Image (cartoon, grey):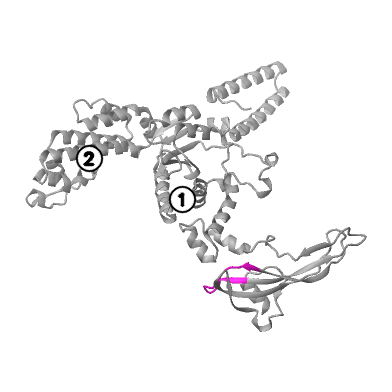
Amino acid sequence: MKNCTLDLLGIKDSHLEFDPKYKNKVIAAGFYQHKKVRKIHLRQSYPCACPVCGQKMRYNGFKTVEMLGLPSGGITNVFSIRKQKYLCPASAACPKTITKLAEIKDVKANDQISQAVKYQAISKLDQNISQKDIAADFGISGMTVMRFAQELSTYLRPNHHFLPQNIAFDDFKAGNFSSSGMSIIVMDIATRRTLDIVRSRHNTYLRSYFLQYDRQARWAVQTVTVDLYSPYRSLIHEIFPQALIIADRFHVVTQAYRALNLVRTQTMKQAGQGSHNARALKHYWKSLTKDSTKLDFKTYRKSRNFRNMQLCEQDIVERLLNMSSALRQAYVYYQTLLQAVHQRDPRLLESLTRSAAGMPEPIKKTNRTLRKHLQEIKNSFQTTFSNGPVEGTNNKIKAIKKTAYGFRNFENFRLRLLIELKNSYVSLNFHSHNRVGDSSHYRPPTPPYVRNRIRRFNNLSFCLNRLVQLDRFISPRCASLLLVMVINSVLLCALRQYPLRVLT
């Protein structure tokens, strides 16, 4: 029965037993740090050998320590443990008196919190719960939970020897961690894993951050998906010279969407506040921004802004466009851009950017932006990558900040985000406690393009061995010439595929 009770309390040390000193009151109500708790009285005693002479040490009384355990039944459990003290007096074998205290399994010396509490608190850090709430569940302080989280920073260090082939990054409102108040999230866009959180979006800071990665890792990046923020372009060309810049299609459409809304509000102001046209443009603004192919032309309803006439959604849009020629031009531009993006038609996009003459000023401004990033938009038509996963992660970051009521320390902020978000450090950059601070035992993961080259080299070696065996059937001179031709063709193909990459 006692063993079952100890198992229920999560006690795994076989040397721990209920303290016979308390007899029938081994589990009783008590106080711990001015809080009402359940106290479990235990005793630990076992034969111990002297670490110097190896002889059996004498028993030298007990020392009572208290250790926080997991709560049960809504009440915090505190283990009051009487630990055996040991003594080995000075003798010929021991030059001086040796003292020792009994040790508990899986508990560090001078630690007043059990490992079970620590593990359970850490396991809740991946949920959107504040550290204060986690601390209240286990009867510890918020700073203690923070210290537990900081122990995980060992496993969340950036791996500067590897970068995925397809990455994406975007800025988000982080706080006063930088002068701009914006930080950067870097993501593997193919697997949708968060790689890191960078403190600032300034080019100087981003350059110093990405230059920490190996040259081979940076040159292995093939695509970088970003929004239309211009300062990123020069940085990407410098840091990732082999990468293709892909403009996010959502941000491309957003440019025309905002321009159309701006023209609509200008038309409302020209019509006058409270006029029929202004009220209609305000009431049916969603129909104007809707894809024209999705407008309802079958269902007719009463439209109060048009004298309760029976109109379908397509009729309403046509009546709105008749109110202003500028609004019609902006609407046609917006719908054409939507069509080009949905159909991934680069020719339609080019013709659209060349036909902005005589259009409203907001559309001209949008057109200049699209012409500036025309090639990047065309690149987006060739892939399925977008900043959608990054934007979704940004929304989750906002929820994490809201739950925590903000962060004052960037390292704690970054740590909590990488714990809650789906990240790649645990799988790609696992550092055991034995390797921390010792780089001699660390072997970085082999980048994918290096693994492919090793595989090709092994296949080439197999082919060469087969060619060498041809001397049984043809003359040695013919076999040598054939071998030289194969080697030259392989080298030429390799140089064409990797003209600038050099393995060191």
Residue 249 picture location, percent across and down? 35, 37
Q: Residue furthest right?
A: 92
Residue type, numbered disc 2: Asn
Residue 107 picture location, percent across and down? 67, 62
Q: Is residue 163 above or below residue 279?
A: above
| Residue at disc 1, secondary structure | loop
Sequence-earlier tag: 1 or 2: 2
Q: Quadrant of residue 364?
A: top left
Can residue 122 be seen here? The reply is: no
Residue labelled with disc 2 = 261
Which sits in the foreground, 474 or 488?
488
Residue labelled with disc 1 = 407
- Quarter of the figure that contains the C terminus: top right
Binning the other alpha carbons within 10 Å of mark 2 as few (below 14), some (14 to 19) or many (20 upward) gives some
Main secondary structure found in the magenta portion: loop
Residue type, numbered disc 1: Phe
Q: Is residue 35 above or below residue 318?
A: below
| Residue 114 as seen in the image, left or right of residue 415 | right
Q: Quadrant of residue 109?
A: bottom right
Residue at image position (66%, 21%) is: 483
Residue range corresponding to the magenta coloring: 66-78
Residue 427 picture location, percent across and down? 57, 47
| Residue at disc 2, secondary structure | helix
Which sits in the foreground, 181 or 454?
181
